[in-house]
Amino acid sequence: MRRFPVILTGFTLASLALLVSLGTWQMQRMAWKRDLIAQYEARGEAVSFQAALCEMGEGFFSPRVSGPAPLSGEELRFYVLRGEPGWVRLGVLQVEDCDSGEDRFVLIESGFENLAGERVSRPAVWRAEAAPAAGMFTPGNEADTNQWYSFDQIEMARALNIAPDQLLPVWLREDSGMPASLSLTPPSKHFGYALTWYGLALALMAVYAAMLFKRRQ
């Protein structure tokens, strides 16, 4: 009888654990995404921008809020992709801290313009959410030319001539539908990914069993 394939078994068990953990992770992501969608769809209407910020709490999205928005000061140009590449114009809105009542400032979208400089849209409804974080391939900000690619609380505050600790780490953006973070990868896709990983785990077990059977012959 041939020796028991220790190395092959160890590799198979490690691979099996990885595949099962990936499938379980996707199932957890599916449940998390369902909760986020339910939270988004359950949002109400806030009576003011101040209320929208305070009612956001620990959630990902605030209630909807409609204008007009009393903007003041300079505007920043923030690069986005909304059907086409362009710049979101970000103004400054003065609000109160939800706990202390001290003066704070929040960036608020005042419009979107394409790369040709044409103003495409002006928001009528907003929602508050966490400021977008920089990705691995996000270009660096160019404060001198007013071209911003990621949220930098200190540099943006300096450009707007306000104290960095007075600028909130959230922004008021146009509420034009479900966020891409929820719509591009719905729960059903996560379920499909989970089935794929679990299916690969079953296939690996079948191949391993077949190899053991062949070795015993």
Image (cartoon, grey):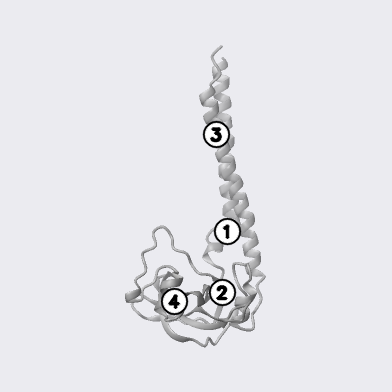
For the residue pair 172 and 41, the one nearer the viewer reads as 172
Whole-percent x, y for residue 50 in the image: 60, 81
Residue at image x 56%, y 74%? 128
Residue 51 to residue 190: above or below: below
Instruction: In the rendered structure, find residue 14 and report the number of the disc placed on it.
Output: 3
> Quick check: 198 left or right of 81?
right
Location of residue 90 in the rendering, given as x and y in whole percent from the top left corner: 45, 78
The residue pinned by badge 2 equals: 128
Q: Tell me if label 2 and label 1 are in contact, CB under 8 Å.
A: no
One can see residue 14 in this view: yes
Q: Residue furthest top?
A: 1
Q: Earlier in the sequence, mark 3 or mark 2?
A: 3
Q: Tell us which disc is closer to us: 1 or 4.
A: 4
Q: Which residue is mark 1?
A: 186
Q: Earlier in the sequence, mark 2 or mark 4?
A: 2
Q: Residue at x 59, y 35 (%)?
A: 202
1 vs 3, front mark: 3
| Tag of residue 157 | 4
The residue depicted at 67 percent of the width and 70 percent of the height is 42
User: Hey, which quadrant is residue 199 in on the image?
Assistant: top right
Label pair 4/3, CB-CB below 8 angstroms: no
Disc on the earlier residue, 1 or 4 = 4
Mark toward the start of the polypeptide (1 vs 3): 3
Element type where label 1 sits in the image:
loop
Q: Is residue 83 visible?
A: no
Q: In the figure, 56 relative to 183: above or below? A: below
- Left or right position of 182 against 43: left
Q: CA distance from mark 1 to mark 4?
A: 35 Å
